[in-house]
């Protein structure tokens, strides 16, 4: 069947470029190949034909006085608000068919829009304009949304880490206003339903609300000229698992309706009218991906067992609850590290004990009895500085070198009310499943003693409030991520119920190399003899005193390093959920003898470059 396409919203120059496309993706186009580079935000290689979509522009809205009475304009505005809320409700109704990740993201976004339409500053201010300045409803909404968006958006001198949040808030005001204005002016929304199934959606800009109506079963991939790797649209497309590349320069000028395209959502490359050789390459990449997906599906059901019979625990590190579906899909048997400093949106106030309790309880219940390790807030370093400023904690936020300053538990002990609210919330949630609590950035035993006293005080207070807690409190463990902790592990073991080896910071603090700086990054390696010595001290002590110990730094995501660590005596690893299949595959091919042998050879090596070579060449 030939493609059917309709272009009710195309501008004149687009219509000029329209040509009858072929739906055949096996034959190259008879035009020269072009390669564009954008930002790959959602993985997957796709070969399909382009379908361009353009937004119908809104009429220019001028702030002229309304010919109607203020009451009549008010009534129009209320009607438009009611209609917009109805449309959002309809959109929400469509979410049930989406994968969990997408549903959670979009649901949260719709809630924000709904709040903005209910007695919000925007609505109140627009009504005031109608009454006081006699404007039309359109003009009032346009004017007030522009003011609020400009106030919410990035400001001169704003710290880098706050800019993204500010941009998002600005976008939210503009999006809600756009929806209201479409309803006031009667200019319809863009619909993706007329796009031929299986094609690549090509747009100048995809807004989060547009992403919400993309059907991942119909649209092969998404390309846009605007957007960035971490904006809401990107997060949503990733969550929907639609291969996507955003920020592709000149995209809509160069792509024609029906052009044959190759999209690589990982590298961000877009090929227009690929030649036969490039098409063949893309096809084999797609076949590879399909094989990989099948393999992962099969692997998930297989135990993480070595050929010599030892079981190795594979847990996931997570930051947001929308990572849970991937965690389950990739067969993690628990959470080894929940970084709570990322869990709550920094543009909103930090939830109080009740608010945090709800978030933890939902997560713990979702884990259905599997280990759920919740780390208390690890603010400081490069994390949570905007939140610290928001809470008025300026000294710590403005430290000259926050990585070496009052970070993690050190900071929480100086602000015990924050730690107490969090511990109470976690304790209350712990009855929903199998929780452990983890303390970050420990450098001496008195910190753990102080935290344990607070922990026990929180439990007593909750019991007095009538909260039912289990007889035995959840284990309280510590991160070993400073050389000081690794070197005094003998004292720490008496205060800590379990250990988590944070190789990311341990590497940084041991080698004195910034983990997030580009300069000097070649010096940053966990495969360094000094690291092995510190890890070994911790592992030996944990094994001697029967304390569970797990590696939750990035080292655990590297299959060959895992082989080395198994040789050291470790049996539990926590990593990003996406890394689990590759690590499991390696584990299932290993014998304990081979790991022991690798480790025995590794501890004799004095040169980090030689150590890296030894581990990289293992089992290859
Ligand atoms: C670590 O330091 O290894 C770790 C897991 O903690 P984070 O990466 O959150 O600092
Ligand atoms: Mg750390």
Image (cartoon, rainbow, N blue to C red):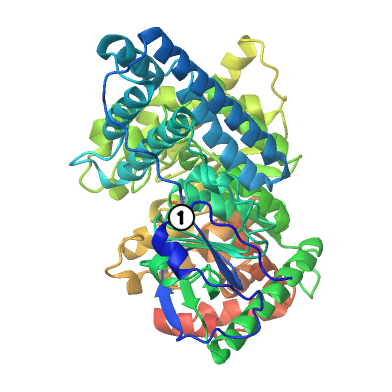
Q: Considering depth in this image, is 255 or 598 the residue closer to the camera?
A: 255
Q: Residue at x 47, y 60 (%)?
A: 503
> Looking at the image, can residue 237 be seen?
yes
Measured as percent of width and height from the top left, residue 489 is found at 49, 51
- Circle 1 sits on which residue? 486
The residue depicted at 60 percent of the width and 72 percent of the height is 46
The reply to whether residue 473 is in sight is no
Which x, y percent locates residue 27?
Answer: 63, 85
Towards the viewer: 384 or 114: 114
Relative to 31, 107 lies left or right: right
Mark 1 neighbour density, 10 Å: few (under 14) some (14–19) many (20 or more): many
At 33% from the left and 47% from the top, the residue drawn is 381
Residue 330 in the image: state x and y as whole percent: 70, 59
Image quarter for residue 520? bottom left
Count of labels in the image: 1
- Give the residue displayed 66% in from the left and 78% down from the top: 24
């Amino acid at each position: 069947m030939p493609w059917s396409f309709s272009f009710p919203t195309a501008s004149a120059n687009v219509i000029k470029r329209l040509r009858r496309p072929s739906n055949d993706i096996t034959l190259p186009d008879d035009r020269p190949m072009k390669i564009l580079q954008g930002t790959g935000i959602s993985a997957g290689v796709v070969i399909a034909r382009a379908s361009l979509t353009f937004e119908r522009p809104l009429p220019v809205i001028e702030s002229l006085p309304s010919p109607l009475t203020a009451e009549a304009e008010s009534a129009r505005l209320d009607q438009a608000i009611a209609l917009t809320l109805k449309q959002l409700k309809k959109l929400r109704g469509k979410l049930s068919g989406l994968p969990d990740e997408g549903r959670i993201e979009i649901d949260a976004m719709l809630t924000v829009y709904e709040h903005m339409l209910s007695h919000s500053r925007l609505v109140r201010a627009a009504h005031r304009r109608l009454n006081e300045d006699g404007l039309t409803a359109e003009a009032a909404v346009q004017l007030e949304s522009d003011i609020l968006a400009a106030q919410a958006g990035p400001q001169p001198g704003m710290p880098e880490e706050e800019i993204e949040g500010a941009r998002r808030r600005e976008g939210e005001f503009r999006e809600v206003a756009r929806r209201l204005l479409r309803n006031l002016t009667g200019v319809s929304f863009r619909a993706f339903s007329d796009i031929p199934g299986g094609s690549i959606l090509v747009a100048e800009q995809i807004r989060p609300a547009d992403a919400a109506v993309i059907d991942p079963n119909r649209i092969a991939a998404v390309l846009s000229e605007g957007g960035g790797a971490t904006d809401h649209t990107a997060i949503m497309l990733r969550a929907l698992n639609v291969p996507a590349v955003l920020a592709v320069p000149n995209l809509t000028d160069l792509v024609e309706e029906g052009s044959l395209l190759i999209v690589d959502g990982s590298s961000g490359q877009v090929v227009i009218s690929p030649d036969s050789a490039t098409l063949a390459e893309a096809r084999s990449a797609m076949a590879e991906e399909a094989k990989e997906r099948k393999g992962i599906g099969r692997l998930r059901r297989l135990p993480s067992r070595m050929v010599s019979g030892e079981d190795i625990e594979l847990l996931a590190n997570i930051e947001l609850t929308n990572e849970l579906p991937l965690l389950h899909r990739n067969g993690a048997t628990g959470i080894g590290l929940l970084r709570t400093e990322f869990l709550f949106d920094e543009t909103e106030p930090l939830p109080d004990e009740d608010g945090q309790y709800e978030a933890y309880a939902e997560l713990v219940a979702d884990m259905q009895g599997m280990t759920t390790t919740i780390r208390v807030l690890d603010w400081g370093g490069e994390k949570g500085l905007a939140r610290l400023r928001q809470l008025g904690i300026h000294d710590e936020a403005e430290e000259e070198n926050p990585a070496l300053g009052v970070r993690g538990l050190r900071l929480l002990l100086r602000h015990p009310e924050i730690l107490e609210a969090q511990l109470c919330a976690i304790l209350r949630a712990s009855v929903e499943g199998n929780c452990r609590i983890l303390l970050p950035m420990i450098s001496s035993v008195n910190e753990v003693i102080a935290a344990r006293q607070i922990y026990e005080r929180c439990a007593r207070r909750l019991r007095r409030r009538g909260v039912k807690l289990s007889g035995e409190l959840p284990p309280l463990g510590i991160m070993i991520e400073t050389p000081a902790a690794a070197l005094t592990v003998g004292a720490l073991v008496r205060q800590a119920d379990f250990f988590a080896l944070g190789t990311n910071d341990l590497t940084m603090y041991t080698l004195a190399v910034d983990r997030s700086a580009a300069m000097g990054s070649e010096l940053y390696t966990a495969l360094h003899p000094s690291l092995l010595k510190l890890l070994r001290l911790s592992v030996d002590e944990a094994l001697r005193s029967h304390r569970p110990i797990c590696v939750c730094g990035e080292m655990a995501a590297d299959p060959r390093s895992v082989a080395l660590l198994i040789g050291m005596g470790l049996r539990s690893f926590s990593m990003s959920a996406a890394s689990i299949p590759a690590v499991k595959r390696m584990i299932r091919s290993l014998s304990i003898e081979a790991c022991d042998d690798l480790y025995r050879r590794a501890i004799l090596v004095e040169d980090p470059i030689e150590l890296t070579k030894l581990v990289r060449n293992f089992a290859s």
